[in-house]
Amino acid sequence: MTQTIAPRLRTLVLLLLAAACALLAGAGPASAHAALTGSDPREGAVVDKAPAQVSLTFSESVSMDDDSLRVLDPRGERVDDGKPSGTGGATYSVKLHAGLPDGTYTVTYQVVSADSHPVAGAYTFSVGAPSETSVAVSGQSAGGGFVGGLYGVGRYVSYTGFAVLVGGAAFVLACWPRGSGVRVLQRVVVSGWLALTAATLLLLLLRGSYTGSGRFADVFDLNLLGEVLQTKPGAALVSRLLLLAAAALFIAVLFGAYDKREDEEKRDLTFGLAVGGSVVAAGLAATWAMSEHASVGLQAGLAMPVDVVHLIAVATWLGGLTALLVALYRGPADTPVPALAVRRFSRVAFGSVIALVVTGTYQSWRQLGSWTAFTDTRYGQLLLVKIGLVAVLVGVAHFSRRWTAQLAEAAPAVAGAAAARRAEKGAGKASTKASAKASGTASAKAGTKASGTASAKAGTKASGNAKVAQKASGTTKGSGTAKGTGTAKGSGGSPRAAQLARQRAAVDAARQKRQRDADPNRFGLRRSVLAEAGIAVVLLVVTTVLTQTEPGRTEEEAKAAGGSSAAASAPSTGAVTLDMPFDTGAQNGKGVVRVELDPARVGANDMHLYVERPDGTAFDLPEVKVALTQKAKSIGPLPVAPDHITTGHWSASGVQIPMAGDWEVAVTVRTSDIDQVTISKNTQIG
């Protein structure tokens, strides 16, 4: 059974790893976490004269340098002064050269959002009239390419290293103190520290190129590295390296002095290690919380400590799971993981899951803002995948708890059987010693008797014949020579005995491992923990991609702002003409109202009204009123009172339309003191 199921589980884990790699590979460049919500001039706008500056408004504050905001003429040459500045809030502007000719201009921007992610884009506007341009606005992105891929891998490795380091150390300290002397657990925790340290150094070197040019050669630019160190993400990475130095000291004590202490002495040291380790773990988690999503946006002061708790809970659960898996599969046969340690970890993991649910619920509300964002945004869709993986992981953990309970119930019986085997082995040794002693006594007595008889005979024979005595003496000398030969042979057997002892030890270890693995409860626990670890790998990948994805709240705000901006910036197609027949029901109450709106876009417009009879002749009315309404945005009605110009002609200038979109134009026509009617038509203004 073991040989049949284990390969299937390994295949499942390999498939999960492949899915994780595919998800990482398909993650693409980091999405913008600060979205462009407005610009002046707007995208696609056609202005009468060149503006003095170009302004961009983002959903949150961003970092800029001299090349972050550029304006290019139709030939691709810069026409800005290269010194963007903030004008209040999240709005930034750059001044343009005076006397710019007509044509299409391109605005490009590449900035770094407050949560450390690069944002890039481009759009065009025109002066006078649109023209051909040599500047391509497609493919504007940031954080992609080879450097972006490396940066994404570094982020994943850093999260994984943090989980293994914190969770592995917590497993040893809180669940299995004797595990501090197990070599494989020491390697797991040290590997987590090495992975996190290497990934942090890699991220620090890649940071400048990742948010800038994207060229790999810039990784080795010391000037660029100096600029990175002055930013919030750079300071967070340096702080992480300093905290990792403290973590190295913690590891040295945990696997050095702590391991060598007796159980009573370990209790005294455990409290100090728990406090110090918690402080270091919280500090490491804070380097993410203070430089990424939690540090900006809604309720940042509360979101950062919540994020720290969330990260530590993830690390305690998944990192401890990794340590347990390695101990179950690679631990020494003579030091199996005790049922008590597994039960302790089960309680710790349960507490971690509770913390994850509470903090994750708050984070989801903060980052999404609405139920529709779960399905309408990429962040929400990834979050649904993460929630599903956590649910599956909790389900598998439930089976692990069942195996843990059965293992705990079987532990006393196993311990009793082991004690019986030790007692039986001790009894066998005592019996062997007794037999040897009895045998030695009998041999001694027999030897004494034989010696006496031989001596008497030898004496008699020697007195009768001296030559025979001399010969006997020579024989005795030869016997001494033979005895020396035997001694040499005995001394040569010492290496052989050592080799046999090593072979016996190896056989005993293999036998103990077979006995341990044959335990159905322990095998079931290993199987479920392996499945948990495989799901955890994919869960960490989804979490890493989530940290690189634009939050749903920001994406929805950007869509709303972008939709209105796109409608508002659409170039004007000229005056809008609406013909609306009317009938007040009275004599001579029929006619047609023609409404002309020029240029029919956001801002000031000229409005003309013409009233004609059915035969086409113009005639006057006692009263004409106009109202503009945009029901989608609950704007209006905005009244317009046109002035009478001549027979059948009314006009109003400077009619302000505040927003692009679908507007309702309602005209009230009164043909007598009591006869009037209101007619309306919708038109697209933008």
Image (cartoon, rainbow, N blue to C red):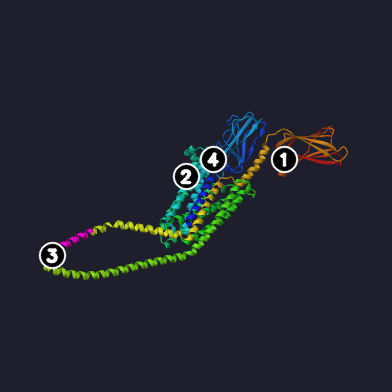
Q: CA distance from mark 4 to mark 3?
A: 106 Å
The residue that mark 2 highlights is 201
Read off the magenta span. 472-485
Query: Which numbered disc covers residue 144?
Result: 4
Indicate the position of residue 165 as horizontal and vertical percent values.
Answer: 47, 52
**Does residue 652 appear to the left or right of 249 in the view shown?**
right
Q: Compute the Cα span from label 1 to label 4.
A: 38 Å
Where residue 300 appears, as percent x and y from the top left, is 58, 49
Q: Which mark is residue 662?
A: 1
Of discs 4 and 2, which sits in the foreground? 4
Could you tell me if the residues under marks 2 and 3 are in contact, i.e. CB atoms within 8 Å? no
Side of 578 where 10 appears, left or right: left
> Which amino acid is tagged 2?
Leu
Q: Residues within 10 Å of mark 3 (few under 14, many from 20)?
A: some
Q: CA distance from mark 4 to mark 2?
A: 20 Å
Give the position of the C terminus as an image quadrant: top right
Element marked by disc 4: loop
Mark 4 vs mark 2: which is more N-terminal?
4
Residue 493 in the magenta stretch? The answer is no
Residue in front for this viewpoint, 621 or 158: 158
Q: Of the residues shown, which amino acid type is indicated by label 4? A: Gly
Q: Which mark is residue 468?
A: 3
Mark 1 residue type: Asp
Tell me which label, 1 or 4, sits earlier in the chain: 4
Q: Earlier in the sequence, mark 2 or mark 3?
A: 2
